[in-house]
């Protein structure tokens, strides 16, 4: 006798649903963390631009900080008060970017993202 039963091939609705739930969860996490990385990229470009500008370097650390803050306000980016430090030391101007961003994820779960970078330029 010949069997007429066919074996099922392919994914079931249940397995497709699990894949969609996992993909949606990962997309949600990426969507919530993306603004923190975009803001960091903007901050990085503002600081790097200032450290490469001889006119800006001639102003000194305090004036540089004020100018950078103005540029960041224009771009609607806020750096924590102690997140950006600029000092002049041994003929170098050193800008240190060191801060964290806390992003609410789900319920009482937060993600903390750390950013840290140091820039150096010769003082004019």
Image (tube, rainbow, N blue to C red):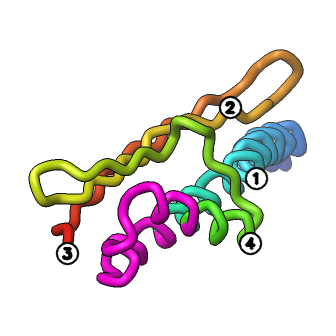
- The residue wearing badge 4 is 74
Viewed as shown, does residue 67 lie left or right of 7? left
Q: Which callout, 2 or 4, points at the residue further toward the start of the chain?
A: 4
Residue at (76% x, 46% y) in the render:
32
C-beta proximity under 8 Å, tags 4 and 3: no
The number of numbered badges drawn on the structure is 4
Q: Which callout, 1 or 2, points at the residue further toward the start of the chain?
A: 1
Q: CA distance from mark 1 to mark 2?
A: 14 Å
**Residue 73 place in picture, x, y as percent:** 73, 64
Residue at (74% x, 72% y) in the render:
74
Q: Is residue 59 magenta?
A: yes
Q: Which residues are magenta?
A: 45-67
Closer to the eye: label 3 or 1: 3
Viewed as shown, does residue 89 lie left or right of 94? left
- The residue wearing badge 3 is 124
Outermost residue, left side = 90
Q: Which callout, 2 or 3, points at the residue further toward the start of the chain?
A: 2
Q: CA distance from mark 3 to mark 1?
A: 43 Å
């Amino acid at each position: 006798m010949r069997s007429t039963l066919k074996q099922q091939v392919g994914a079931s609705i249940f397995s497709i649903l699990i894949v969609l739930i996992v993909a949606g969860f990962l997309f949600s996490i990426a969507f919530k963390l993306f603004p923190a990385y975009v803001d960091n990229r903007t901050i990085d470009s503002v600081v790097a631009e200032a450290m490469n500008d001889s006119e800006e370097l001639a102003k000194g650390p305090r004036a540089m900080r004020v100018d950078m803050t103005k540029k960041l306000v224009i771009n609607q980016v806020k750096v924590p008060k102690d997140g950006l430090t600029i000092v002049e030391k041994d003929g170098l101007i050193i800008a240190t970017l060191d801060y964290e961003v806390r992003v609410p994820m789900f319920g009482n779960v937060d993600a903390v993202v750390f950013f840290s970078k140091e820039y150096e330029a010769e003082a004019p």
